[in-house]
Image (spheres, rainbow, N blue to C red):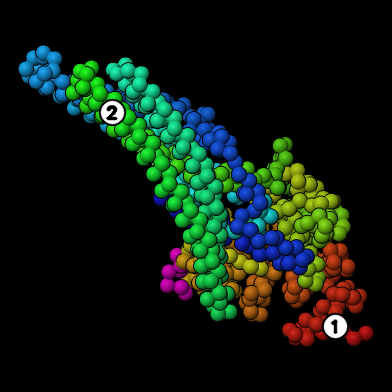
Amino acid sequence: MALESRLFRMLIQADRLSKTASSCHMRSMRRSSVRSPPAVLPPALQVQRSTLQTVTALLPYLWPARNIGARIRVVIALIFMVLAKVATVYVPVVYGRIIDALTPHGPALAPYAVPMLLILGYGLIRLSAAAFGELRDAVFASVSQRAVRLLALRTFRHLHAVSLRFHLDRQTGGMSRVIDRGVTGMQSVLRLAVFNIVPTALELAMVTAIIWHMFDWRYAAITFVAVVVYIGFTTALASRRGRYRRTMNDTDNDASTKALDSLLNYETVKYFGNEAHEAQRYDHALARFERASVRVQVSLNMLNIGQALIISAALTLIMLLAAAGMEDGSMTVGKFVVVNTYLIQLYQPLNFLGIVYMTIKQGLVDMEQMFALLRVEQEIADKPAAAALAANLSEGSAGEVVFQDVQFGYQPNRTILKGVNFTVPAGGKLAIVGPTGAGKSTISRLLFRFYDVTAGRILIDGQDIRDVTQDSLRAAIGVVPQDTVLFNDTIRYNIGYGRPGASQPEIEQAARQAQVHDFVLKLPDGYDTIVGERGLKLSGGEKQRVAIARTILKDPRILILDEATSALDTRTEQDIQSALRAVAHRRTTLVIAHRLSTVVDADEIIVLQDGRIAERGSHAALLAAGGLYARMWTLQAAEQNLEPLPVT
């Protein structure tokens, strides 16, 4: 369906949006030897909710609290439902009277008038039954579709609200299947439970009462017992099929995850020539899904056979009683037809009830993981009284950044930062360098508040970032990451993403500062050029410059440059460095760098080693100290023809 397709595309888009932060964090995770166990979904999604809990979670969407119009439509739809069922159960009664009126030995009636009126009434009642049913669906359509829309929107927003840790653990393929099935399951439950289970129960009650009134208690007793046995049998077997369905869902998630992950990493598969290996992994997942699907289908066949047996036995018993009534004259031809018609009419909703029950049961199973997803709590949440980050106007547009004895670890038993202290004055430039795994990128993740510190605190203009809203904090910070992932949209959209609603001249000005405007103009479609999945149609340097333009357009108070020019050649890097220096003017800048030539102009350079600040000072002072920084510079000088360490 269109809604599920849009939600799937939005989920993939959300995956791209989180790739930048995820990639940097994953490097830190690998360096710190932290490993996440492979799973189709995070453990929180494995929590299974009971049917009652799932239905309870669904009710607010069906009966919205602050939507009087929707509640009125639900009531009107219920009225139409009752009218449709009343008309339906009276159709056999009128039909039987027509037969008695036309039977030669029937009651003495006017030759033509009464049968004609009964026939007209029969047609009108049948039309009413159909019309009320269609009106019911038409009135309820807006309620059900709005409920599905609200659930899809809530899920999408929740995915953006949960922590980065959650997104690093999840896999897009399995997640998309959970959401796809959850939305479809909700549509099925809303459509079938409200206007099939309840109407069928109402019809069964009315039919049983009419049969008892028109005939005797034996007919009603057989009907009642058949219904009870039918429902009990269906419920028992459906519960077992629910377990089979869960297994099938899990194997479906696994197969979808493997397929999507393999296709997203198409180039890697080609690099290593592992097409056969990927096909084998996918086939093993499909084989497990095949076995689970067969069990689901066979159990459905057994269910249908049992249902047919119960209904056929009841139908045979009642028809035997009716035949005996015809023999002793207690039943007319019309009544015989009525009881037969009622039984056939009763068989249809009962048979459909089994299908509906199974569909609803499967829908509730499909919704379990989706509602469990919505119950995943935000690891990083705003405090109830959190205020917006206030700017220190006396310092201009920049902001002072202070790390006070910051300690942090991704896992309790593995500390990454061990008491880091530094201050970046408003408008100042701090460079963070050090060996791989020292915790450089972790500092940027903490400043952007993807995680909260374990101990210590981080201040911006004297405000603890845990006391301000995340929206205002992140609005004040711009990040140019090393690994840039773009949306599968135009260059205009990707640059304009830095400030939605920006005008074309503003987008072009940002592109000029990022040294990408001239390149874009040379493209056949200019700013309307589609960059492809994750920007793969552009080179690494072109993607990096688009990312820089996007950050320039955002115009943040604080800049974080995480290896921002690592994908560029030397000449382009020099041009971009000039642009970045212009952008960083009057802004606080943190530069995370491996290439030391990019940080020589920093006001202060701190050298991280094993989660601590090993050295700090200016470029010249650190070279003169002859420590870790000087050794790193000497090694890079040999590789990049930099100015060698002076001999003293």
Q: Which of marks 2 and 1 is nearer the N terminus?
A: 2
- Name the residue located 24 percent from the left edge and 26 percent from the top edge: 323
Q: Which label sits on residue 289?
A: none
Tell which of 143 and 555 is nearer to you: 143
Magenta residues, as a range? 522-529
Residue 222: x %, y % from top left = 37, 26
| Quadrant of the rendering where the C terminus is positioned | bottom right
User: Which residue is under mark 2?
Assistant: 320
- Name the residue located 53 percent from the left edge and 61 percent from the top edge: 288
Query: Label 2 is placed on what type of residue?
Result: Leu
Label 1 Cα neighbours within 10 Å, binned few <14 / some 14-19 / many ≥20: some
- Name the residue located 70 percent from the left edge and 43 percent from the top edge: 382
Residue 4: x %, y % from top left = 45, 50
Tell which of 501 and 315 is nearer to you: 315
Residue 279: x %, y % from top left = 51, 71
Asked if the stretch drawn in magenta spans residue 464, the answer is no
Q: Nearer the viewer, mark 2 or mark 1?
A: 2
Residue 588: x %, y % from top left = 74, 59
Q: Answer left or right for 108 relative to 586.
A: left
CA–CA distance in space, label 2 to label 1: 108 Å
* 477 to 514, vertically: above or below: above
Asked if the stretch drawn in magenta spans residue 528, the answer is yes
Q: What element carries label 2?
A: helix
Q: Answer left or right for 460 relative to 186.
A: right
User: Which residue is under mark 1?
Assistant: 645
Q: Answer left or right for 404 relative to 203.
A: right
